Amino acid sequence: MPEILIVDDEKVIRETLRDILEYEGYKIDDALDGPSALEKIKKKKYDVILCDIKMPKMDGLEVLEASMTINPEVPFIMISGHGTVEIAVEATRKGAFAFITKPPDLNQLLLHIRNAIDRTELVQEAKTLRKKVFKTRDIIGESPAILQIKETIEKVALTEARILITGGNGTGKELVARWIHEKSNRSQGQLIEVNCAAIPSELIESELFGHEKGSFTSAIKQRIGKFELANDGTLFLDEIGDMSLSAQAKVLRALQEKIITRVGGEKAIPVNPRVIAATNKDLLKEIEKGTFREDLYHRLSVIVIRVPSLNEREDDITLLAERFVSEICQEHGIHSIKFTNEAFNELKKIIWTGNVRELHNAVERMAILCSKEITADDVRLYAKPIPKHDISKELDISRFSKIEDFREQAEMIFLREKLKLFNWEIIKTAEEIGISKGELADLIDKYKIRKN
């Protein structure tokens, strides 16, 4: 039975509308002002909201705007005794489904309600279909490490335990987080992702906890943070090792007390998302260096899932390459392409520093540039491998007396080969190897790497 919320400060109007709509078979809830309506909207999903415009404490347009940040899909039918074109336009601009004047025409009101419910049902059907079409990619692999990860996901997904996913860039940490969410009791809610490495430290707190209008120069309106948005779902904090200590302290408080305060605000807001974190760093070493809080680490790492590098699961390379080439051919409208056995052997010789993401890029390149099959020569030509034996030739261990000198030489060779692979596109190279453009520029200068 569809449920409708009536928001109006006049008791007689609320009761009249309740009698009419209950007779029509709808379940009715009501609120006498904006703040109480928003409290109800936070706790329950309504099929339609009927909202008066002129009310004390908070007018209907403010209720509409605030509700859009909580649930932008619920249709609002605005009702006004002072209907003007300007108000109707403003209500529509803010997201209202329909606008009617008092006293409302009963047939018109019922028609708007039916249309609003039909639209909501269509939106839900479209979401379901989209979820079926764009389902989360499978975790591909039969290696012991991958089988262990799949087993762990099955065990922990239905719990509320916090999970820390570790592993190098491109190993598939995000995919593991997505599967935990998909198999959890929160799968109907949103998976909200925050890349802590991509957000400047001065903005991360606003991103996570939201901010009030006017709290800083560019805060021209209130913003709801990711902790609130993920309330009924999962909050995925990717690359949490790059989060500032100030933000870490507030995340710890949010996890301990299940409340947050928006930047520039004073009100304590209850939150309860399931938190999954991921990092490519060794957080225990970061704790020793003083860049990561030990108490936060213990809060996040109830369950730790380590995703192995691609070279640690060499036998999975064949399965991954076959799946990738099939999907890529379909996506680009290319005829079916197969790998030769020799090509698979060449793929296994490559040091995949970018892991599964790098393998996918290499397969896509070969699928586009090669003919009916991908041979060993194609892999050597287009995958731009860094063969294992080549590195040992360049790194003559006998030349180095200190481990730091050896590391620097290896880093220089790695950067040089990656820059060649991406035709010296600095932004693309930096993105692929997981550092910023500025950091890459500094390393190029440090090692005096020059374009040949």
Image (tube, grey):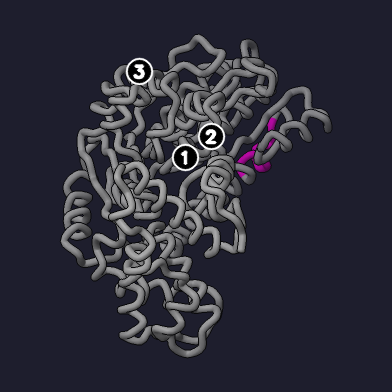
Residue assigned mark 3 = 253
Q: Which mark is residue 427?
A: none
Note whether 379 is above or below 82 in the view shown. below
Task: Say which of marks 3 and 2 sits in front.
Answer: 2
Tell me the quarter of the picture where residue 249 sits.
Answer: top left
Q: Quadrant of the N terminus?
A: top left
Residue assigned mark 2 = 199
- Magenta region, residue range: 104-110
Residue drawn 46% across the image and 24% down it: 40
User: Could you say which is closer to the camera, residue 439 or residue 336?
Assistant: 439
Residue 19 percent coordinates (x, y): 51, 29
User: Could you say which is closer to the camera, residue 192 or residue 282?
Assistant: 282
Q: Amino acid at mark 2?
A: Ile
Tell me the quarter of the picture where residue 84 sits.
Answer: top right
Residue 152 percent coordinates (x, y): 18, 49
Residue drawn 55% across the image and 80% down it: 369
- Label 3 vs 2, first from the N-terminus: 2
Numbered disc 3: secondary structure: helix
Note whether 316 is above or below 92 in the view shown. below
- Label 1 vs 3, first from the N-terminus: 1
Residue drawn 29% across the image and 48% down it: 180
State the separation of the CA atoms marked 3 and 2. 20 Å
Q: Amino acid at mark 3?
A: Arg
Tell me the quarter of the picture where residue 276 sits.
Answer: top left
Residue 413 percent coordinates (x, y): 44, 57
Residue drawn 47% across the image and 28% down it: 208
